[in-house]
């Protein structure tokens, strides 16, 4: 359980370690029949077209979707950030913790049977912790992809869908309208474009999220929009992430190595 006094007594490094323990993460073991997959995404800036970072995903199925680990790398391959998601409590609202060594920040969300807590720990030691009733949180972070799979038929038919998505740094959920749109002329055939915008009158003027899926296997080939990584100006990076290849088999050791690899600060575009 996250409480303001818990965070304020510890450095963000210790808080991060304790938060991982609180949500029940353990290194993969042999007690549960599991298999792992891995794949890579390449992120470029939507405005400048410059390469931003590489993200490596490791996904555990035990036997259904269980955990996800994302390691963010600079151009030289050194990891500067890591995000861990636990779907075991809820596939739509997974617990997650994101540590960005480059920014010196930690943020995330934890959902329990009684309440949901979102938090952000800044490099200067300041903290923001928000507590909500658990029934006020329907969707968190990569639970969005699971939600799309659950509404796939309606979305493919062009029906607009609405869903509240928790924004951890703001401590509340915002309703998004999601609908199928026409793909661009350079998109390969057999792909579907879905667009998500804030479902209010000024949502049209704010950054949108667009996700492109291959229709035959629902593989996410591209993401466009703001992420929960931030630039030097402390604003969310607005990027295009391409996932050109299908997942490959991985192992528990690959997962453990990725999780325990030390994060380092490296030079990134501002």
Image (cartoon, rainbow, N blue to C red):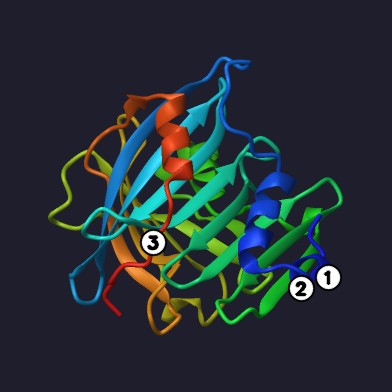
* Res 245 → quadrant: top left
| Whole-percent x, y for residue 195 in the image | 40, 59
Q: In 3D space, how far apart are the residues under numbered discs 2 and 1 (Cα atoms)?
A: 5 Å
| Whole-percent x, y for residue 24 in the image | 70, 39
Query: Which numbered marker is on residue 53?
Result: none
259 lies above or below 235: above
Query: In the rendered structure, are the residues bearing label 2 and label 1 in contact, judged by CB atoms less than 8 Å apart?
Result: yes
Direction left: furthest residue: 186
Q: Nearer the viewer, residue 203 or 126?
A: 126
Say which element carries label 3. Answer: loop
Query: Which numbered marker is on residue 8?
Result: 2
| Rendered residue at 14%/56% (across/down) | 185
| Rendered residue at 83%/70% (across/down) | 5
To which residue does mark 3 refer? Answer: 264
How many marks overall? 3
**Res 103 visible:** yes
Say which element carries label 1. Answer: helix
Q: Nearer the viewer, residue 233 or 123?
A: 123
In which quadrant is the C terminus drawn? bottom left
In which quadrant is the N terminus drawn? bottom right
Q: Earlier in the sequence, mark 3 or mark 1?
A: 1
Q: Earlier in the sequence, mark 3 or mark 2?
A: 2
Query: In this rendering, would 107 be left or right of 116?
Result: left
Direction right: furthest residue: 114
To which residue does mark 1 refer? Answer: 5
Local crowd at mark 2 within 10 Å, few (<14), some, or many (≥20)?
some
Query: In the rendered structure, are the residues bearing label 3 and label 2 in contact, judged by CB atoms less than 8 Å apart?
Result: no
Q: Nearer the viewer, residue 166 or 262?
A: 262
């Amino acid at each position: 359980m996250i409480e303001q006094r818990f965070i304020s007594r510890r450095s963000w490094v210790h808080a991060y370690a304790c938060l991982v323990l609180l949500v029940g993460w353990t290194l993969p073991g042999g007690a549960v029949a599991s298999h792992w997959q891995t794949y890579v995404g390449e992120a470029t800036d939507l405005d400048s077209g410059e390469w931003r970072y590489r993200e490596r995903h490791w996904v555990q199925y035990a036997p259904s979707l269980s955990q996800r680990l994302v390691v963010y790398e600079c151009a030289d391959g050194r990891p500067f950030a890591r995000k861990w998601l636990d779907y075991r409590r809820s596939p739509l609202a997974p617990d997650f913790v994101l540590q960005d060594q480059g920014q010196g920040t930690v943020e995330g969300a934890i959902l329990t049977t009684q309440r949901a807590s979102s938090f952000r720990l800044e490099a200067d030691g300041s903290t923001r912790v928000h507590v909500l009733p658990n029934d006020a949180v329907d969707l968190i972070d990569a639970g969005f992809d699971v939600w799309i799979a659950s509404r796939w038929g309606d979305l493919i038919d062009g029906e607009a869908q609405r869903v509240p998505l928790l924004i951890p740094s703001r401590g509340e959920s915002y309703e998004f309208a999601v609908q199928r749109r026409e793909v661009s002329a350079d998109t390969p055939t057999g792909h579907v474009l879905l667009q998500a915008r804030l479902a209010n009158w000024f949502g049209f003027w704010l950054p949108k999220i667009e996700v492109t899926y291959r229709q035959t296997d629902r593989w996410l080939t591209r993401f466009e929009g703001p992420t929960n990584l931030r630039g030097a100006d402390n604003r969310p990076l607005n990027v295009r992430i391409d996932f050109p290849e299908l997942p490959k088999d991985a192992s528990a050791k690959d997962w453990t190595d990725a999780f325990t690899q030390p994060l380092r600060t490296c030079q990134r575009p501002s």
